[in-house]
Amino acid sequence: MTSVTLRINNIACRYESTSVLEDIELSALGGDFIGVIGPNASGKSTLIRSISRTLRPYMGAILLDEKDVYALPSKEVAKKLAVVPQESVITFAFTALEIVLMGRNPHIGRFDAEGADDLAIARKAMELTNTWHLSERPINELSGGEKQRVIIARALAQEPKVLLLDEPTDHLDIGHQIEILDLIKRLSKEESIIVIAVFHNLNLASLYCDRLMLIHHGKIFSLGSPENVLTAENIKRVYGVEVLIKRQPVTNSIYVTLLPRRDSMPPSSDYLSNKGAPKRMFFVHIICGAGTGSQLMHLLTERGYKVTAGVLNAIDTDHEMNYLGIPIVSEAPFSSISCEAHEANLELIDKADVIVLTSIPFGYGNLKNLEAAELALENKPVLLIEKEPIEKRDFTQGEAKKIYNRLKENGAVVLQDTKEVLPIIEEIAR
Amino acid sequence: MNYLEKILHWKLIITYLIVVLVLTIVITATLGPAHIHPLIVLKMLASRLPLVNSLVAPSWSISEETIIFQIRLPRIILGVLVGAALGVAGTAMQGLFKNPMADPYIIGISAGAALGATLAMVTLASLSMYMVPLMAFIFAMGAIFLVYNIARVGSKLPTSTLLLSGIAVTLFLSAITSFMMYISGEKLHGIVFWLMGGLWASSWDDVWMTFPWIVIGTTIIYIFARDLNVMLLDEEPAQHLGVDVERLKKIIMTFTSLITASAVAVSGIIGFVGLIIPHAMRILVGPDHRILLPCSALVGGVFLVWADTLARTIIAPTEIPVGIITSIFGAPFFIYLLRKRKKAIF
């Protein structure tokens, strides 16, 4: 059996006279899992509607197995192509099984009724979507998530070769999201089905899709593998937000982290209020690592302080904060702090008005950071965040502890928590 | 209840309702000013059936035979036909529009028929007995044609514009009908009587005039029962499940109009049957049109025959229009259903 093909040939769609899609090109083979992403009103759902014969493009053609879907009878198309809509409003009392059996409609002749085969297929679809136990329940009494899984079972009961899903899992909890997407992914490979799914959640899209189509203002902004489409640059230009792109260490998929917009952050509580914002440029240098400084860097930057940091290893979590434009002295991954890095660190310390040392563990590799703090203490305030006693963080057989205690003795301020840092810095800045 | 049990259950319901229908015909045939024993009625019916007719010896008078066969039976059979037509048409309209308030008259059929009948009664000096139903039928179909063409957008028939143009055409035609009634003089009584709906003076001719249309129309609507089910999911999902939505709308509209116009032409405007019966049946047997349509047909027939029996016996020898009976009993029942099943009308 040859694989199903779907070709979207340069289509353009409009509602009345408003153009909503233009120059859309795509070609897919059985087994492809394609994600459609883009902001609200970018034309994602319109694409699904035009492929599913609901909104005829005024230009171009959609070819299913090389035949124009708009030239085929709806029954022929429905045998090959199933749609899971964004939301299904069903207000009458069909049972879940009856709804799934409607998926068999295109396969049943005008004068026939559902047979044992159809019932078996419907049952299998319900078992796959974990809804068989709901089969006798009226559909209008099911929860949103249960209903959506029944609708997905209905689509599977059509035994489609192309499955279109419009934000299929938005109503589901994360457990069912993963379960359903796993199932659809598996079916797409096993049964050689083309899946085209609209996603809002970029991370789910990157986790499941072989290809992504990023739509912006009705046009393809980017089309390709998740790592090529989900770049910080693309997302900033299309969605207008700052994000951090990482590779998930476990799944190796692209992972998008949203970052709040710095210019529009509202003060969220009293101690975050802008009362104490500095009048002049006030420099805070943070000696940190292993993610202990990220939160503080973010907070201080938001409040208008000039933040610097060092010395960090280049793959350290805190190192990712340089997206904030924070000058960071870095060192090669897993290397000890070199003399050059130490020098650079001291230079930043020299410019700073106050130094913060976070609750980091010390080994021989980063002992120089502790020495830097000690040098700083000679002429400026040093804040020590001590979430854990130094004994537990000392991996240098007492050497770090010695310097640390000297810091304390010589007047470094000891704080229990990161939260206490901002009020003190505000105090000093004033 | 599993699927096969459900099918079996359906067959039982249909069988039961057919028995009820036959009993209704026999019992109501005995009721009237002249009392005729049910056994006699059964024997009379048997004498007209092939195979068993030789077993029955006539034991009744000629006048009894005339009352049953020429007066009561055609009226009862016509009641069954009209009730069934209104039940089926109401079910199909409610399903097609996904609107529990839809009834067979919603897209202008009643207003067209009323105008046609009024025109016939006012303008034609000597009335042939067929002119009123003929004019009612022609104008009913004309009204539908008008509504259809007002509502049509290109080759599509959007449900909302269809309902609205139905209302607009109804108002317009009713205004003309009112004018005709205003200038009708002594014929007003006949017009009002017709408009209220009734089955009096029904003859076998009336039965044979409506029978083919109602049977053909109902059968064709039933063939599309599964599509009507899928249509309840809304138009887009129905399209995705292989239903040619626009074609289905046209087919259902055409044949619903045909059977409704046939019914209205011979019986006038009998209200509430097409609204109440589908509702009650949906609550009793569920929303699947494959059982809902036959049940609505059978119960619609039974209901109208009993209502008509009441209409002709309650203050005999005076008859009241059966439309009054159906509304008097139908409206409170409808309110009862609304209160009881507020959320689950569909």
Image (cartoon, rainbow, N blue to C red):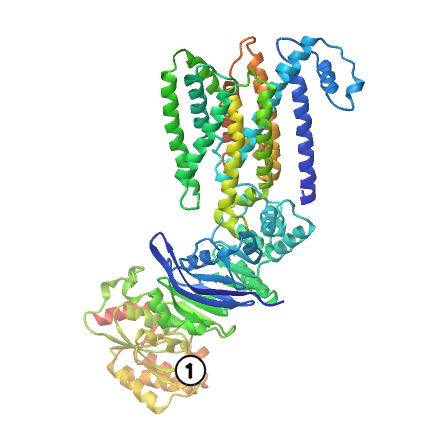
* Residue that badge 1 annotates: A362
Task: Please state which of residues A239 and B281 is positioned toward the viewer in this rendering.
Answer: B281
Q: Position of residue B17 (x, y in %)?
A: 66, 29
Q: Quadrant of the N terminus of chain A?
A: bottom right
Instruction: Give the residue furthest to the left.
Output: A279
Q: Residue at x 59, y 18 (%)?
A: B203
Q: Position of residue B91 (x, y in %)?
A: 54, 34
Q: Residue at x 38, y 19 (%)?
A: B180
Q: Position of residue A231 (x, y in %)?
A: 39, 72
Label 1: element kind: loop
Q: Quadrant of the C terminus of chain A?
A: bottom left
A20 up-or-down from A26: above or below = above
Task: Please state which of residues A265 and A24 is positioned toward the viewer in this rendering.
Answer: A24
A178 up-or-down from B277: above or below = below
Task: Please state which of residues A391 and A252 is positioned toward the viewer in this rendering.
Answer: A252
Task: Please state which of residues A373 and A56 is positioned toward the viewer in this rendering.
Answer: A56
Q: Position of residue A16 (x, y in %)?
A: 35, 51
A157 up-or-down from B160: above or below = below
Left or right: A146 as drawn, with respect to A395: right
Instruction: Give the residue furthest to the bottom.
Output: A339
Label 1 sits on what residue type? Phe
